[in-house]
Image: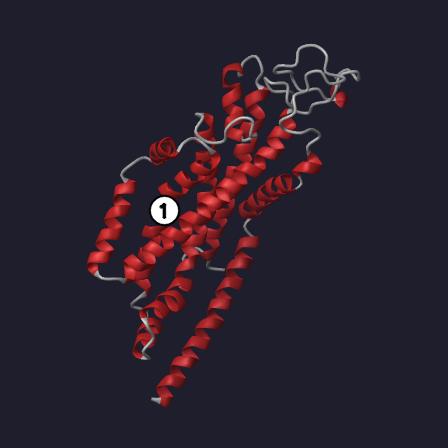
Amino acid sequence: MTSQTAKIELDKQTEVRLGGSLWRQAFRHFIRNRSAIAGMILIGFVVFMAGAAPLIAPYDPNLSMIGLPGHEGRLAGQAPCIHALGCPPEMAQHLMGLDLNGRDMFSRVVFGSRVSLVVGFASVFLSIIVGSLLGLVSGYSSFWTDNVIMRSMDVLLAFPSLILAIAIVTVLGPGLQNALIAIAIVNIPVYARLARAQVLSLREMDYVLAAQSLGDGNNRILFMHIMPNALTPLIVQGTLGIAGAVLEAAALSFIGLGAQPPTPEWGAILSEGRNYIFTSPHLVFFPGIAIMITVLGFNLVGDGLRDSLDPRLNKT
């Protein structure tokens, strides 16, 4: 028994060294991926903009310019005014123009990054926590427990995600917090099914069987041996899921169920200017570009992580 225990400990130490080596190899592969680095730059730009919003934004995002010096004349939907590009110096400078209420668009877009990132990260975090726990329990429990959990996930997956999110927010009431909860709920089945698939493939591995032979309890085996090895696809899916959550939050705000006025949120800003796309295109162009940059950044990083962490694709 002593020699068997020593062999198992040696196998665990070897597994740790190999795991560390695989992570280092994945990191080296990731930083050589130009698309992933481009995505990191885009995400870094958006995160910096959100963190430094009070320093970057020249005005309060909810402050109307009506009646302030240098803002005489028509203010509703005023086009961008940049002195370096020929805008009269007597007019106040607004890099992205003014919205229909005379508020600085640049300040609202900058502060909107905070709202979108908070919703994206928070909703995905909740989805991963709840979905992973359900998937782990489902994959390692009895047939009946597995069947009940997975059939419940199938019911949620039967509805289009945006339609289900709209239904949940309608029941809970419009608002950014309820939109966050709805986005988290509709994405839980994705992580639950992914975690369950990982458990089903890992629970027959030698190190799990060895832990069972040593008398480890189910909870210890599940959370100490299986879960750490099931994190890789969840991390990749979570990175891609942030992009989807940002889009869903913008869609809910666009139809009036997410962020409520005067909260500066990209989808809400788009909704306010959608009827003026031909007369004042800056009202929809700049928040649309902000959404595109954020979603593109997370998609590029997610694809880079998938390629780096998949041993079938990472050959070098």
Along the viewing direction, whichever of 214 and 87 lies nearer the viewer: 214
Number of numbered discs visible in the structure rendering: 1
Left or right for 214, reference 271: left
The residue at the point 54 percent across, 37 percent down is 115
| Quarter placement of the N terminus | bottom left
The residue at the point 57 percent across, 47 percent down is 37
Secondary element type, mark 1: helix
Can the viewer see residue 185? yes
Can the viewer see residue 310? no
The residue at the point 20 percent across, 57 percent down is 144
Q: How is the image coloured?
A: secondary structure
Residue closest to the far left = 144
On the image, the x and y values in percent for residue 159 come to: 29, 36
On the image, the x and y values in percent for residue 61 come to: 63, 29
Q: Which residue in the structure is indicated by mark 1?
A: 188
- Compared to 246, does 277 lie above or below? above
Residue closest to the far top = 73
Along the viewing direction, whichever of 21 and 120 lies nearer the viewer: 120
Q: Quadrant of residue 179?
A: top left
Left or right for 75, reference 253: right
Q: Which amino acid does the dot numbered 1 rest on?
A: Ile
On the image, the x and y values in percent for residue 249 come to: 46, 34
- Compared to 63, does 311 lie above or below? below
On the image, the x and y values in percent for residue 157 come to: 29, 41
Q: Quadrant of residue 49?
A: top right
